[in-house]
Image (cartoon, rainbow, N blue to C red):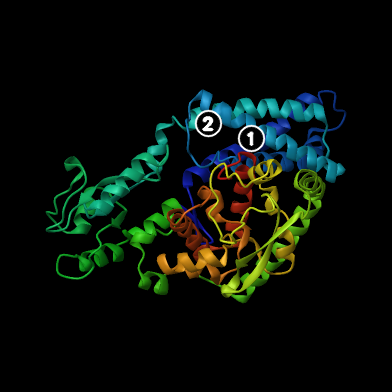
Amino acid sequence: MIQVSNHYVSKFSVLLASIEAVALFSIFFAGAAIRFLQWDGTISELLISQLPGAFTFTFVTIASMAALGMYQMEGKQDFEGILLRLLPSFALGFSFITLIFYLFPDLYFGRGLLAIVMLLALLLLLLIRLFFFRWSGLDNLRYRTLVLGADTNASELLDLVNGNSNLSNFTIAGFVPLDKENRHVPVDMIIPKTGTLISLAHQYDASEIIVTARERRGGAYPIQELLECRINGIKVIDLVGFYERESGHLRMDSLYPSWLVFGSGFNQGALRTMIKRVFDIIASLLLLIVTLPVMLLTALLIIIEDGRPVFYRQERIGLAGKIYQVIKFRSMFNDAEKGGKPQWAVTDDPRVTRVGKIIRKLRIDELPQIINVLKGEMSFVGPRPERPHFVDILTAQVPYYNLRHSIKPGITGWAQVRYPYGASIEDAIEKLQYDLYYVKNHSLFLDFIILINTVGVVLLSKGSR
């Protein structure tokens, strides 16, 4: 994994994106050469004239593929699977390029060139991915790791590695059990502790040790051996750090207070706050301009189906536990909560109007929260705000829940792009693991990643109810 601003990115994703970016950039000039066979000027003049278009095409295509999850290394990676994911990505890229042409006419490079380039790029990326996922050299990029412990945590870790993705960042050389420990991993993967940990690491060519054992006191725990490995350049990581790096969340059942207190992250400096506020204002104004026609049409349809009011105001918990009024398009009937008692949303909720079902799936109902962002009550990216009634319940039952309120809530967030819609206490716990990851590691870089992924969530209607 490659660490960027406290966020971890798969090196396989970075490698694939880099190869494809170079390929797209090059293919654009190849398409230009085909399109302008009768060019009267020099080759250098042609290349210079097409540079803005090449950068635009490359950036939009890579961003569209990222938005639809093509760099998450999930799903079938055969011919059919790759093609079925490339086609929607190119359709999305074409839409964005058309919008860019409309907003910035100077970047227009012609429909003929765009058609040639997109066809060539589709064929080239298909070939690149078919080769990439079958390239034996990828094994050399994986690092080997030993796991200290063979308990249930180790078994869950093994299940995650085996079923998580097509390209794991590492391979498990084996499990080193502690004395008197119940073993829950395959016998053929157990490595007897016949020597020190550093000797075993060298023997199995391991560059990292993952510690899954819960007990950290007493003679059975080889703290001195772990320190020796650390001093000699072998990375040592605990289970919380492993899940943070590989899965993008802080696992609640492995989290302990001292890790939160003494670990890295949770930076809330004045500079970061100022940058995030500027980003919020710019992003919100741009979104308001782009979506204003959609918002006006939505307001009209709500009035036609169920009358006024168009907007729905509801108390939510914001920064530092302060209550504010969130603004959303009304997606339920006026008498949705007759008894006044808040209810969890459910699949196919009968309280939702016909217009409400559509705007919820497309997340259009969230757009009026732009006003909350401009007022400073919310951020564009952050943990989703919850109602006071549910916050009281969750705070009493879920450890560390109030940490979500150490930063402003957001219109979209890490939990929203990584986990389905939450509609129970169990779901709230799962989502909290992602929210805590964001609170700990939030940065402008992570905000951009969330925004790109939000496009895919909206277009594919993931997690809507």
Q: Secondary structure at mark 2?
A: helix
Q: Nearer the viewer, residue 338 or 47?
A: 338
**Residue at position x 38%, y 61% from top?**
252
Which image quarter: residue 32?
top right
| Whether residue 67 is situated above or below residue 341 in the rendered picture | above
Residue 447 position within the rendered picture, expressed as x and y whole percent measured from the top left: 61, 57
Q: Which mark is residue 184?
A: none
**Label 1 belongs to which residue?**
89
Along the line of sight, which residue is nearer the eye, 194 or 420? 420
Q: Is residue 283 visible?
A: no
Seen at 54% across and 29% down, the residue is: 82
Say which of marks 2 and 1 sits in front. Answer: 1
275 lies left or right of 103: left
Label whose residue precedes the other's in the sequence (2 or 1): 1
Q: CA distance from mark 2 to mark 1?
A: 14 Å
Where's residue 8, x and y in %? 48, 55
Does residue 451 appear in the picture of this structure?
yes
Residue found 78% across the figure and 44% down from its top:
301
Q: Position of residue 157 (x, y in %)?
A: 32, 49
Q: From the image, tell me which residue sits under label 2.
A: 129
State which quadrant residue 123 falls in.
top right
As shown in the figure, which amino acid type bears the numbered disc 1? Ser
Q: Quadrant of residue 188?
A: top left
Question: Which amino acid type is shown beneath numbered disc 2?
Answer: Arg
